[in-house]
Amino acid sequence: MTLTRTHRPWGSLFDELRRDLDGLFDHYGAGRPVASSRGVFPPVNLEETSEGFVLTAELPGVAPADIQVSLEGATVMIQGERKPHPATPEEHAVHRRERRTGSFRRAFELPATIDAEKVEAFHRNGVLELRLPKAPEFQPRQINVQAS
Amino acid sequence: MTDREATQELTASEKQPVAGEGTRPGPVYRPDVDILESRDGYLIHVDLPGVDEKALDVRLEDGVLRLDVPAPAPDGAVTTPLHTEYRPGGYHREFRISEGIDAAAVTAELRNGVLELRLPKSEARKPRSIEVRAA
């Protein structure tokens, strides 16, 4: 798994980004259960903690080496490719093919700037987890009240 | 005895999980599968994202291969959901297995959230080429 920061213009990505953002704001605080994301791969959950954000994506059958995570400002993007299973025999008949393969790309703009140096990415049981700490200026701060 | 026969018997059942079957509350999904057949046997790949091998129950009984994963317990983390596209859940699926499978040799391996089941054909069911001799 590579974690890189890209500096390319988003261009055609913008529509996709906007769509994801619309979904994001749709569900801000509104207790609606699951966003209508049928057919979108991978399905992504985004949660906020006091320190930052946790993004998880269900990516069964995608090797860590085939996942790229990039970050620019408050925008995080995951992309990669789900390949046919490596154990596929050369000569075979297909009885069922429900698992789809191909490339994927999803981008999310977070409501706070991310501390890029401290981003962590984990891959476990086919689920990608990104821990995205907020930049220092977005971190919660304790203010001491002084007696005057 | 042809492969075609065996093929028709290995079908994924479409039935939904029985309500209240799980020991924990939570959704139970029917996972996506690929079923391939080669000369030596069947190869089944099952998408099980987020499933730990300890939670996975695979059993072969009365000619039915059953796959069960209970819905996970809530992790109790204090977070605010901003965007939710999936809910972790359990999984359930059954496959009817033909008699041509060597049940004792079935193997299961979980890797990157995908279960691989290998079901070797019993020797008698493997295709053989018959030498034709001139009389």
Image (spheres, coloured by chain):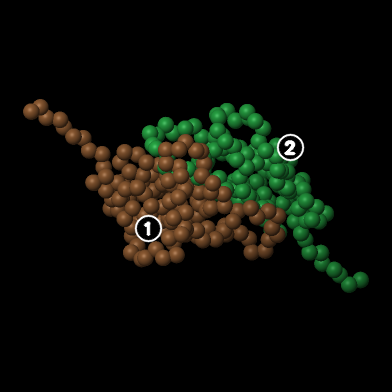
Chain colours: A brown, B green
The residue carrying mark 2 is B62
Q: Is residue B21 visible?
A: yes
Mark 1 element type: strand
Q: Is residue A44 above or below residue A5?
A: above
List the single residue furthest toward the right.
Answer: B135
Name the foreground residue: B37 vs A101.
A101
Which class describes the residues within 10 Å of circle 2: few (<14), some (14-19), or many (20+)? Answer: few
Residue A147 falls left or right of residue A53: left
Res B68 quadrant in image: top right
Tell me, for residue B70, which label it has, or none.
Answer: none
Name the foreground residue: A81 vs A107.
A107
Q: How many marks?
A: 2
Residue A51 falls left or right of residue A86: left
How far apart are labels 1 and 2 at the CA level?
50 Å
Q: Is residue B43 visible?
A: no
Foreground mark, 1 or 2, reads: 1
Looking at the picture, how far across and down is residue B111, in whole percent?
52, 49
Q: Chain of mark 1?
A: A
The residue carrying mark 1 is A70
Mark 2 element type: loop
Q: Which kind of residue does numbered mark 2 sit on?
A: Asp
**Residue in the image at 65% along x and 46% along y:** B106
Position of the C terminus of chain B, as image quadrant, is: bottom right
**Mark 1 vs mark 2: same chain?**
no
**Residue in the image at 68% along x and 61% along y:** A92
